[in-house]
Structure formats: structure tokens, C-alpha cells
Image (spheres, rainbow, N blue to C red):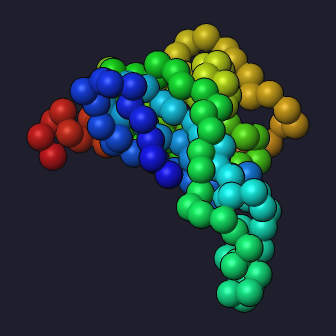
């Protein structure tokens, strides 16, 4: 899959892949998050998943390398250092490079649902999942500690 950076002087800093839904999410040094939906030739992602787990005969029907269509491209941070796919809720968790950058939660379309550590309240759409919220809060706290350690020279 070839990722285009739209003639910008940026580079991919992080990415994650959701093999179940077929999404590739990439963050770049310019602060942009790009979401791609992958397909595998004319057979589709479902055939590729089956072929990856099955025999060579099953995977032989795939025509060519995976292709990606752009779902969304959106400004997120000064420089994106982390992107994570939150499978249960189909959301993207990201963080930026600068110490003032915070951990944010996004929809696939680039709508910022909230920023961890901000005073304002916000909701994760869909079915409540206390475990998800706890894991997201732990990830945000770990990121804050890592940034504090970097700033302190340790």
C-alpha cells in the first residue's frame, strides 16, 4: 500500500492496522492522521483474511497487492507520535510529540470527540464500556508520565 503525503515535507511517524475491519491509520510528522480502508484485489478483504488463515489455494484468488482508499485525512497534532485503533468503538486514539500535546480520541471521519486531561466533559458514542474508558485513561496517564520524564531529562 502506497501512502501519499500530498507533496508535503512530512514523513510517517506511526501507524496501526486493524485486520478485522481493514483499516490502516497513519500519523505523520506534520500532525496529520490519514485513515485508509484496505481492499485486496477484486476478492475483497474478507477473502484476504480467509486466505491468510487458510491454504495457498484459497489465497491464490487474490489479485495483486492490497489497495487503500482514503477514508479521511485530518489535522490532529503538531506531530503525531502515536495512533491506536480502538476496535470495539471504531475510534482512533492519538498523541503528539510536544509536551503540551495531549491524548485525543477521534472518529474515523476526523471528528475530535475529546482530549484527555481537558476540563470539559465529553462522551464516547455507542454502548458504554467502563473497561474501555479505564484503558483510555490509563493510556493518557502513561503518555503524560512519559512526556514529563522526557522534559525532566530522564
Q: Is residue 86 left or right of residue 75?
A: right
> Is residue 70 visible to the viewer in this orientation of the structure?
yes
- Residue 110 is situated, as x and y percent measured from the top left of the image, at 61, 22
Instruction: Please tell me which residue lies in front, 61 or 26.
Output: 61
> Is residue 133 visible to the viewer in this orientation of the structure?
no
The residue depicted at 54 percent of the width and 25 percent of the height is: 73
**Where is residue 115, by image quadrant?**
top right
Instruction: Please tell me which residue lies in front, 73 or 39.
Output: 39
**Where is residue 106, by image quadrant?**
top right
Count of numbered tags: 0
Instruction: Please tell me which residue lies in front, 30 or 92.
Output: 30
- Residue 111 is situated, as x and y percent measured from the top left of the image, at 64, 19
Work out which residue is located at the far top of the displayed protein and give it: 120
- Residue 55 is situated, as x and y percent measured from the top left of the image, at 72, 88
**Where is residue 146, by image quadrant?**
top left
- Residue 89 is situated, as x and y percent measured from the top left of the image, at 76, 40
Instruction: Please tell me which residue lies in front, 146 or 44.
Output: 44
The residue depicted at 64 percent of the width and 54 percent of the height is: 18
Q: Is residue 136 left or right of residue 150?
A: right
The residue depicted at 74 percent of the width and 22 percent of the height is: 123
The residue depicted at 52 percent of the width and 21 percent of the height is: 74
Q: Is residue 38 left or right of residue 33?
A: right
Work out which residue is located at the far left of the displayed protein and give it: 153
Up-down relation of residue 83 to residue 67 (above or below): above
Work out which residue is located at the far right of the displayed protein and give it: 127
Amino acid at each position: 500500500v502506497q501512502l501519499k503525503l500530498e507533496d508535503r515535507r512530512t514523513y510517517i511517524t506511526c501507524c496501526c492496522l486493524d485486520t478485522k475491519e481493514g483499516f490502516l491509520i497513519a500519523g505523520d510528522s506534520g500532525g496529520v492522521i490519514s485513515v485508509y480502508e484496505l481492499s485486496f484485489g477484486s476478492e475483497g478483504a474478507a477473502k484476504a483474511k480467509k486466505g491468510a488463515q487458510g491454504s495457498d489455494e484459497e489465497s491464490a484468488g487474490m489479485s495483486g497487492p492490497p489497495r487503500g482508499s482514503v477514508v479521511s485525512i485530518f489535522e490532529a497534532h503538531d506531530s503525531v507520535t502515536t495512533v491506536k485503533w480502538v476496535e470495539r468503538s471504531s475510534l482512533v486514539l492519538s498523541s503528539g510529540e510536544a509536551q503540551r500535546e495531549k491524548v485525543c480520541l477521534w472518529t474515523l471521519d476526523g471528528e475530535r470527540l475529546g482530549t484527555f486531561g481537558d476540563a470539559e466533559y465529553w462522551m464516547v458514542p455507542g454502548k458504554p464500556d467502563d473497561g474501555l474508558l479505564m484503558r483510555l485513561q490509563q493510556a493518557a496517564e502513561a503518555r503524560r508520565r512519559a512526556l514529563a520524564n522526557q522534559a525532566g531529562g530522564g
